[in-house]
Amino acid sequence: MAARAYWQGQIRLALVSIPVEIYAATKSGAKIAFRQIHEPSGKPISYEKIADGVGPVDKDDIISGYEISKGNYVLLEDREIEAVKIESNKTLELVQFVKADEIDPLYFEKPYYVAPADDLAEEAFVVLREALRMAGKIGLGQLSIRGSEKLVALKPCGKGLLLETLRYADEVRKGQSFFSEVSSAKPSSDLLELATALIDKRTAPFDPAEYHDRYADALRKLIDRKAKSKSKQAILEDTEEPAPRSGSNVIDLMAALKKSVGESGGSTAKKAPAKKAPTKKPAVRKRA
């Protein structure tokens, strides 16, 4: 089945309008969702709308409320909310261009593919794509859809364009408050050299297929086994126990880095079997 367009309209750059279609670049079908089940009967649990001190209420008696202080709400009816919604339009106007590295990754939210709507739009579409690529710039605009307005960025993506929704400034927390207690002292050059060598050794082209959600994979296997089994009890496979923690909290960073650099740490290299180290008592660090 052909993918359904998330949005259809036109990108406008000054007096030039380009009919396009926008498609979601990601999918959520891989996620595993659970329902709550009443075990004795095997029936799914339903949820009732209940008001404190009143009990179950009728759906027609429910309106939206915004809490302005503890227990105090501003009540809004659906028609009032609908009245302030922004009318969806079919034009995305590019109002500004910025360098690709000027936008902090924190602001990027969700990607979409952009394709020309028909053969007549292809020439102008290709010109815009190549102009953005040559300039090394990203186009910015605001897209009105489903009653809200989204800030979006547009950039080249292979033979097409990639549109990414952006978070607004008030949706992003400033990180400096979380780092205020982190030391600003610079590490020694020896430690930096070893850490850099380790990074270089494990540097390889990014291949997303190399990575898997191991939790989701394990859940699917468990569900498959339970579906084939008559028992209600979970059938769990033996899993490796985590290595016991060392008796000492003292970590020799230099020794750890040297050992890491010495070992084969490449993403495709095979690791040699580790030799069992003789048991030693934890080292005691003398005070300076």
Image: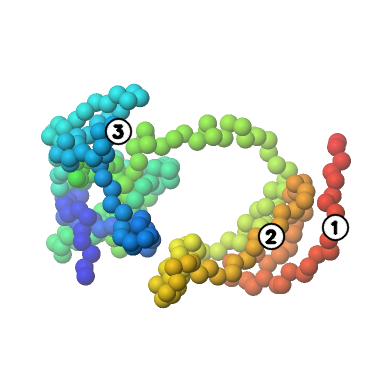
Residue 64: which quarter of the image?
top left
Residue 45 in sight from this viewpoint: yes
- Name the residue that disc number 2 marks: 243
Q: Earlier in the sequence, mark 3 or mark 1?
A: 3
Q: Residues within 10 Å of mark 2 (few under 14, many from 20)?
A: few
Q: Secondary structure at mark 3?
A: loop
CA separation, marks 3 and 1?
A: 62 Å
Instruction: Check contact, mark 2 vs mark 3: CB within 8 A.
Output: no
Q: Is residue 162 left or right of residue 210?
A: left
Which residue was labeled with disc 3? 52
Is 231 on the left-hand or right-hand side of 86? right
Q: Amino acid at mark 3?
A: Asp
Residue at 73% x, 63% y is 262
Give the side of residue 155 with respect to residue 14, left or right: right
Q: Quadrant of the N terminus?
A: bottom left
Q: Amino acid at mark 1?
A: Lys
The residue labelled by disc 1 is 280
Quadrant housing residue 60: top left
Q: Tell me whether the residue at label 1 lies in contact with that at label 2, contact meaning CB atoms closer than 8 angstroms.
A: no
Secondary element type, mark 1 = loop
Lower sequence index among marks 1 and 2: 2
Disc 2 on helix, strand or loop? loop
